[in-house]
Image (cartoon, rainbow, N blue to C red):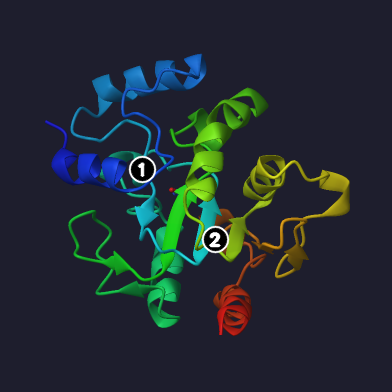
């Protein structure tokens, strides 16, 4: 029995640009999903819907759900190691309210912010391929187009950065990924980059809590 499927279905319907829960666009991801349904029948095992508010001014774009985190709980970064840094930071900077409890029914809510992923389904070995990033892009496009309140997009890592650039038809060579750099996109929106808050990046010291918080300080300053 999949836990909290009612909450996941509500999230799926409550924001635009979510993949249908039975999306079958990517053969490799569907095959992986089916093997996970056998191994972990209690997990969500589907395209994880975005989490946040319709009036989001900040959109956070991650890579893809982690197998035993967001793919299990059905909420981006929830139960993933990366969520242990992301959610406390969102709470600290006022983009979330309540308490983060690593589960979809922890009562946490977002404040003028939304979290989504460049690829909505968990990929094998945590690595997406170009075709999957392309297949999933229409969902990101719809999410952004139907959320006109967005003023700044935070890309967590290079895949998210490129997904945002492709969404707007921007040249990748004009906007190189760089940690804590803000890019002014042609349509007036701002894109800010951060190294992904993954276990690998935090364990190796590539991303520290201080560096991550500096990104949020810049976002806060920009939003005023
Ligand atoms: N969990 C997510 O939902 N996205 C990521 O990018 C990493 C973990």
Q: In the image, which disc is placed on residue 49? A: 1
Q: Which residue is mark 2?
A: 197
Cβ of mark 2 under 8 Å from ligand 1: the answer is yes
Query: Residue 43 location in percent, x, y?
Result: 24, 35
Rendered residue at 45%/67% (across/down): 85
- Is residue 130 in view? yes
Front disc: 2 or 1: 1
Q: Nearer the viewer, residue 59 or 66?
A: 59
Q: Quadrant of the N terminus?
A: top left
Q: Give the residue at x 22% y 39%.
A: 9
Residue at figure coordinates x 36%, y 59% from the top left: 52
Residue depicted at x 56% and y 78%: 223
Determine whether 73 is above or below 2 in the image: below
Whole-percent x and y of residue 11? Answer: 27, 47
Q: Spatial distance from mark 2 to mark 1, Cα to Cα?
A: 20 Å
Work out which quarter of the rendered image holds the C terminus and state it: bottom right
């Amino acid at each position: 029995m999949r836990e909290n499927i009612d909450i996941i279905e509500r999230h799926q319907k409550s924001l635009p640009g979510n993949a249908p829960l039975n999306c079958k666009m990517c053969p490799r991801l569907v095959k992986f999903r089916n093997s996970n349904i056998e191994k972990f029948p209690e997990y969500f095992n589907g395209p994880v819907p975005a989490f946040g508010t319709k009036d989001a001014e900040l959109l956070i774009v991650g890579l893809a759900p982690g197998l035993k985190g967001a793919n299990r709980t059905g909420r981006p970064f929830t139960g993933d190691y990366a969520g242990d840094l992301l959610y406390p930071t969102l709470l600290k900077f006022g983009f979330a309210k309540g308490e983060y409890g690593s589960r979809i029914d922890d009562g946490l809510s977002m404040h003028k912010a939304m979290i989504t992923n460049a690829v909505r389904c968990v990929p094998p070995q945590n690595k997406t391929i170009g075709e999957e990033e392309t297949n999933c892009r229409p969902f990101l496009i719809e999410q952004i187009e139907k959320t006109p309140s967005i003023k700044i997009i935070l890309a967590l890592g290079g895949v998210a950065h490129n997904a945002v650039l492709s969404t707007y038809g921007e040249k990748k060579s004009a906007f190189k990924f760089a940690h804590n750099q803000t890019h002014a996109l042609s349509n007036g929106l701002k894109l800010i980059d951060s190294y992904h808050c993954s276990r690998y990046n935090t364990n190796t010291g590539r991303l520290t809590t201080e560096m991550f918080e500096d990104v949020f300080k810049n976002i806060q300053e920009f939003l005023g």
